Image (cartoon, helix red, strand yellow):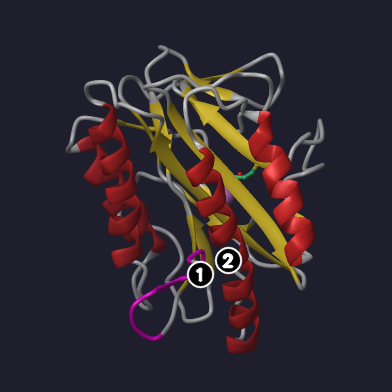
Amino acid sequence: MAIIIKSDDEIAIMRQSGSIVAQTMQKLLAELRPGLVVKELDAIVRKEFVKHDVIPTFLGYAQPPYPATVCVSVNDEIVHGIPGRRVLQDGDVVSIDLGCTYKGFVADHAVTAIVGTAKPGMRELVDVTKGALDEGIKHLRPGNKLGEVSHAIGEYIESRGFGVVREYTGHGVGRAMHEDPQVPNFGPADRGPVLKKGMVLALEPMVTVGDWRTRQLDDKWTVSTMDGSWAAHFEHTIAVTDGDAVVLTVP
Ligand code: MF3
Ligand code: CO
């Protein structure tokens, strides 16, 4: 397992990649409303990515090839939802996951938002998931073990009574969307590689209101909670520096 160290120049490119993804994400979030057909979000991404001259990293990824430019996961869907004919309803909780490749470098970013009026408990789910990502970022410092990051994220979530998805993890990111190391959202603090300046990681806590166990739908992509409870997902692409980590997926 080799973790690829990025130069300052490479991180500068990744920051531009991250900026394009984050700007596009803001456009998508502004579109969320009851009545929106989810695949319209895919159309917006295609147009924006042509404008910025970036490659949609997700399109054609893996086997069977992912068929869209963005993942949209609604309510009990956790990640990898394929944008289709579904119509958003008031009180839906929607996770949007987006990646682009700019000058050969990938930025990976996810946000969860509520459409219209939140149902009871929904806002706390979203806030805890976002808070868990922020907690992980605080521990992303040179000299810390990666396990400290995973542990901090998992403790933050479980101490608030929510479930931590186990089967999917964060990851290194750079010239490939998924590089070493995997970054679980739980586990002991005294494990894993020591963090160094120039590592770039995608942290992405996936949180459930109920049980953390997942199932994959017949489309071979969409991952839902087994028990039908709501889920949320936040993700940033982040560089380890000499001091505080730097979030690259910001506008
Ligand atoms: N953020 C997701 C991940 O790290 C994006 C993958 S979606 C895919 O796995 F369609 F490209 F697989
Ligand atoms: Co990711």
**151 left or right of 51?**
left
| Above or below, comparing residue 220 to residue 95 in the picture | above
Residue 3 image position (x, y, % from top left)? 60, 69
Front-most of residues 103 and 152: 103
Q: Kindly identify the amino acid type of the residue bearing the numbered disc 1.
A: Leu
Residues at marks 2 and 1, CA–CA distance in whole angstroms: 5 Å
**Tag 1, which secondary structure?**
loop
Placement of the N terminus among the 4 image quadrants:
bottom right
Q: Can you identify the residue that label 2 sits on?
A: 18
Residue 177 shows in the view: no
Residue 68 image position (x, y, % from top left)? 74, 37
Please tell me whether the stretch drawn in magenta is mainly helix, strand or loop: loop
- As drawn, the label of residue 248 is 1
Identify the residue at image location x=40%, y=12%. Answer: 227
**Tag 2, which secondary structure?**
helix
Q: Which quadrant holds residue 103?
A: bottom right
The reply to whether the C-beta atoms of the residues labelled 2 and 1 are less than 8 Å apart is yes
Identify the residue at image location x=43%, y=81%. Answer: 241
| Above or below, comparing residue 223 to residue 176 in the picture | above
Q: Name which of mark 2 and mark 1 comes first in the sequence.
A: 2
Q: Which residues are magenta?
A: 242-250
Q: Kindly identify the amino acid type of the residue bearing the numbered disc 2.
A: Gly
